[in-house]
Structure formats: C-alpha cells, structure tokens
Amino acid sequence: MQANAIIPARSRPRPNGRGFSLLEMVVVSVLLAIISVIAVPRFFAVARQREEKAISDVEDLLRMFAFRNSVGTQQIGLHHDARFGEVSLWILDLNPKDPEGPRVWQQDRLSNPVELPEGMVVGFASADGIPVRDDTWIISSHPDGSRPLIEIGLKGQHAEGTVMLDTYSTVPMRLDREDGLVRQPIDLDREGRTYDRW
C-alpha cells in the first residue's frame, strides 16, 4: 500500500489561471512609479519645446513677411485658419484660371506654413492695434507697399508668447522674453545723441 505524500505549498504546481503575489504587485508598482517620475517631466518638456518652436516659426514667418514686402511688388499677407491650425504667407497674384481677371489671394509657394501643435491656438492678432476677431483672417500689406504693425499672441498648454513686427522693421520681436527686456525704438535726435556711436 502506498501512502499519499504531502507536497509542501511552495513546490506544488500552480493551476494555469495563476494570479500575482503581493510581492510581484509591489515590485511592478515601484517600477511604474520610477518610470513615471522619469518619463512624465520629459513628456511635458517635449510638449513645451514643440510649442516654443511653433512660436519661433511664426516669428520666422513674420521675418519672411517683412522681407518679401520690402523686395517684392506684390501685396503679401499673413493668413491664419483656425480649422487647420496653421499660419502661412499668402500673396495677391494672378489667377491661374483667369489670368486677365482680378488678382486673387493664394498661398505663397516659397514658404512653408507653420502648423501649430495640438492644443495651441492664436489667442489674438492685431493690425495697427485693431484686433482681428475671426477664426480665419488675413493681415496684408497695403497696396502702396507699406505694412501695418502686426502683433500675434500664441497660447498653448505649456508655453505662450507674443510676437510683434513693427511697421518699419524687418526683424520681429518676441515681447515676452524670459529676461523681461523688450527692445523699444529710441529717437537719438530727440535725445540729443545724434553723433553717438552705436
């Protein structure tokens, strides 16, 4: 007669539907906490960098707007469409379908549109201090070749900034610089500094 042997609990085979022990759950929880402490700040840093890059790209687009306005003969405009979340340069050019007809606005082929990251919007825009209120707008140079003072405020979930292009400047300015300094024009003649070196 054979006696039934008692198998210790540790060496017993487990059924196929095995669960997790408390120790395994604690180890996994600690690992997930460590990974989240490392990954979450990096995720937000990447999102902030994307939004800062979009602000810089809009600043570059304003620089291109000023350059194209100063060397070209066509009216140029800054176009925004909230549905697509992009800001782009447009020119008033011949209509390819009707070259003899009036000129029409069309996207500039020499510059790429700036696609805003998800969650980033144009908070406000103004031309010569007059706010633009629509979701789709165009701020254009004047037919005589002059252009308005342009301000564009961009707002994202992690970064925001205001970019301005002065009427006679070819270099846009970021008004919300981290050092708090904003460049302002100085009339050297009025200040009696006509012959100062600069």
Image: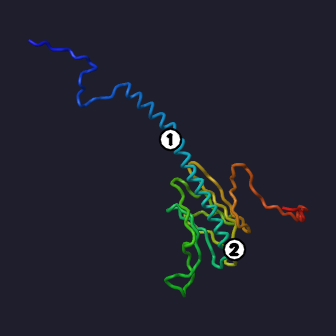
Q: Is residue 157 above or below residue 75?
A: above
Residue at image position (72%, 68%) is 167
Q: Quadrant of residue 189?
A: bottom right
Mark 1 residue type:
Ala
Task: Farthest residue to the bottom: give it.
Answer: 100
Compared with 155, 25 (above or below) is above
Residue at the farthest front position:
2
Q: Mark 1: which secondary structure?
A: helix
**Going 49% across and 83% down the picture, which residue do you hit?**
97
**Image side of residue 161 versus residue 109, left or right:** right
Label 1 CA crowd tier, 10 Å (few <14, some 14–19, many 20+): few
Q: 10 Å neighbourhood of mark 2: few (<14), some, or many (≥20)? A: some
Residue 154 - label? none
- Viewer-nearest of labels 2 and 1? 1
Cα separation, mark 2 vs mark 1, equals 47 Å
Amino acid type of the residue tagged 2 in the rendering: Ser
Q: Is residue 8 above or below residue 122?
A: above
Instruction: Write down the quadrant of residue 68 in the picture.
Output: bottom right
Q: Is residue 159 or residue 52 the one in the foreground?
A: 52
**Label 2 element class:** helix
Viewer-closest of 48 and 102: 48
Place of residue 109 in the rendered image (x, y in percent of width and height, measured from the top left):
55, 73
Residue 39 - label: 1
Quarter that holds the C terminus: bottom right
Please state the horizontal and vertical placement of residue 93, each as a whole percent of the image. 57, 79
Q: Residue at x 68, y 61 (%)?
A: 164
Name the residue located 67 percent from the left edge and 78 percent from the top edge. 143
Tell me whether circle 2 and circle 1 mark residues in contact (CB < 8 Å). Answer: no
The residue carrying mark 2 is: 70
